[in-house]
Amino acid sequence: MDNTQALGQNRAKPWQIALFPFNNAATNVYFAFYTYFTYFAMLFLTGSTATSLAGAIVSGGLVLIITNFNMLFAPLMRVFDGVTDPVLGGLMDKTKTRLGKFRPFMIIGNLMLALSLVLMTVVFRGVGNNLSWLRWVAYILSYIIYVLGYTCQCAVTKAGQTCLTNDPKQRSQFVIWNMIGMIGSIVLVNVMAGGVLTNEAICPKGLIVHEVTGGGGMTAAQMVEEWIAKGINYSNIDVASLTGSNYTYLYGASYGIQFYNIMVPFVIIVSAVYTAMAVAAIWQKDRPEFWGVSQTPAKIKDYIGIIKGNKEIRWLVLSSGLNKLASTVATSGTVAFLVYGCLMGDYNGLFIPFYALCFVFMGIFFLWGSNTAGRKGQKRGVAQFTVFALIFYIGVLIMLCIYNHDDPATYLSLFKIDDSGFHVTINAYTVFFIIFYGCGYGAFNCCDNLTIPMVADCTDYETYRSGNYVPGIMGTIFSLVDKVISSLQTVILTLFICIINPNVDALPAEGSPYVEGMQLSAILCFCVLPMLAWAVTVFCMTRYGLSGKKLQEVQAVNAVRKAAVQGGMTMEQAMQTWQSIDQVPAAFVPVKKPRINKKTGEVIEEKENWLDKVYNKIFTKREKTTSAAPSSNAVDIPDEYLTDEVRADIANFGKDVGQTEECKVEEGVVETDGTEKENE
């Protein structure tokens, strides 16, 4: 047994830590493909799939029909989501099957996501115009299945960490593997759909023709003339069959039948593989002995008490929800078109390179953030890197403020290709922008990902506080607020881009020209909104109490209670007996290994640096934690509640710890009572 591992401490194997975040990647594959799912739905609902599929510029009343429908349907789905999230969370908490508590939701959720995609893009593809009502039914049904499947699987990403590991250092590694999963999901889908399959040799572009009743269209001959003039491929259209005189057509970046024939199985297979990897990772841990202390599931009335009594989850949800809103706005396609297209005039030449550069910075900050959170707690990581994001974005704000549409020196510029070849055109403005934006982007993405393991911390705290083990409801509370807040994205974009600027009557898209006032909109959406959200996060973290030391107390108290309950003690007795770490027997308190200089054998004392001093001054004032070590107040588990396994473990641990403490006393790291000295 590892001398530093206390009884009840649950650690996972490295490969389990690496593979479980791919459950998040599995849902992100569908999330990334959702845009193309919507393209299909627009064409499907307007009856276009009977001929061919092409997406892009929809004219006439077709877009109005879909837009109005989605304006009513999307909020209804949010209400539906709001009802299903806590229901599914409660169901997860009550689930006990041969497959465990979490694996059924991962598998069923992924199957539902696949079903939603197949229903929309395969099964109902050939529905004729005489059954147009069935298309609307298919769209609604597919979306409902998508929402349910996404919630089922996504909730496990947060809830499942409670049984995978309770080691803060291991939980902090989630951000690294989640970034790898993000590259293998969101980036992979976008590169495949928006890059590889745009090649006409793979997916030929098509054209869709709609007959319009009531006038406003063109004759078939007029349309053919325009197609020829614009070089549009109309080989898939039977021109001879176009009778009458009123037509309108769709053209542009095509997503035809061949595109969906390739992408739909691609998405389903990739997501299924990721799900299988995550299921394998949690397989050995999804068992009752790793599910927490409580033996009885919480009731509906208990959930109100959870929200009311667990202030830590409230602070976390508030900060994370606002961060989510800010990031969905700042990183939206609309804002990308606004900044790189309208302001800088080169969307195609800037967006993808900047997107790639951001992942380089993210990798650096994720490694740094994971190391910081592992050594000093998740709260420290979120607080520290949120402040970093704020500082770097001050630089981004300055860069956008000095932008002048009439001065090319204030344009972002990377390269250009002309008749004479490829030319690098990076200017000083671009260099500073890349540094400020890259570092800020890496820092705030690190914060965003660190909040996911913090949900598991809040779940453990709820067990410590009330005795309830409710990972499902904790995960879905977090997801619900996250979804509701992020659903305001379009409202915020419309407010900051269209309403405050009378010169703009629609959200920017590819090819939208620059108009006066867009600079202010870019500053608000790209900088000010995220910075305000991060300021709120900083405030929330000054109130959030689950620091590294407090979590050590939570884990130790939960461990000794669990051992006693397994021996027959009631949960109520256990909660009354052990309430703080100074009451916990030494065997249940992890002893931190000292850092040893391999060359000299001397103990390396970790000194307080300037970041520690700033953090302690700002973020730990309200924390009231007992030193993370046992004391003479420790209460042993009564003999009648000791199982043979726990009794043997305590006996063996006592021998090992005694030897370890003697060694440490000689090195001057641990006092004779086994408590760890506070290093300056």
Image: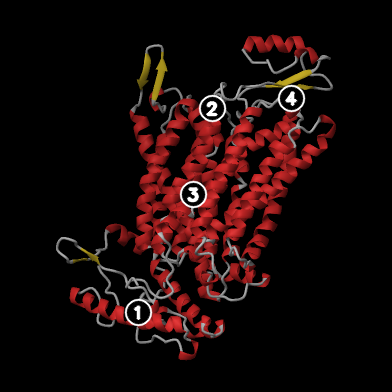
User: Where is mark 3, residue-wise?
Assistant: 532
- Badge 3 marks a residue whose secondary structure is helix
Q: Nearer the viewer, mark 2 or mark 4?
A: 4
User: Where is mark 4, residue-wise?
Assistant: 51
Q: With respect to residue 378, does 210 lie above or below?
A: above
Q: Given the image, on which type of amino acid does mark 3 rest?
A: Leu
Tag 1 near tag 4, CB within 8 Å: no
Q: Return the residue nearer the eye: 15 or 577.
A: 15
The CA distance from mark 1 to mark 2 is 72 Å
Instruction: Of the two numbered discs 1 and 4 on the same chain, state the one appearing first in sequence.
Output: 4
Residue 590 falls in image quadrant: bottom left
Q: With respect to residue 373, does 437 lie above or below?
A: above
Residue located at (53% from left, 56% from top): 279
User: Where is mark 1, residue-wise?
Assistant: 653
User: Where is mark 2, residue-wise?
Assistant: 516
Tag 3 near tag 1, CB within 8 Å: no
Q: Given the image, on which type of amino acid does mark 2 rest?
A: Glu
Q: Tell me, for residue 55, which label it has, or none.
A: none
The CA distance from mark 2 to mark 3 is 25 Å
Instruction: Of the two numbered discs 1 and 2 on the same chain, state the one appearing first in sequence.
Output: 2
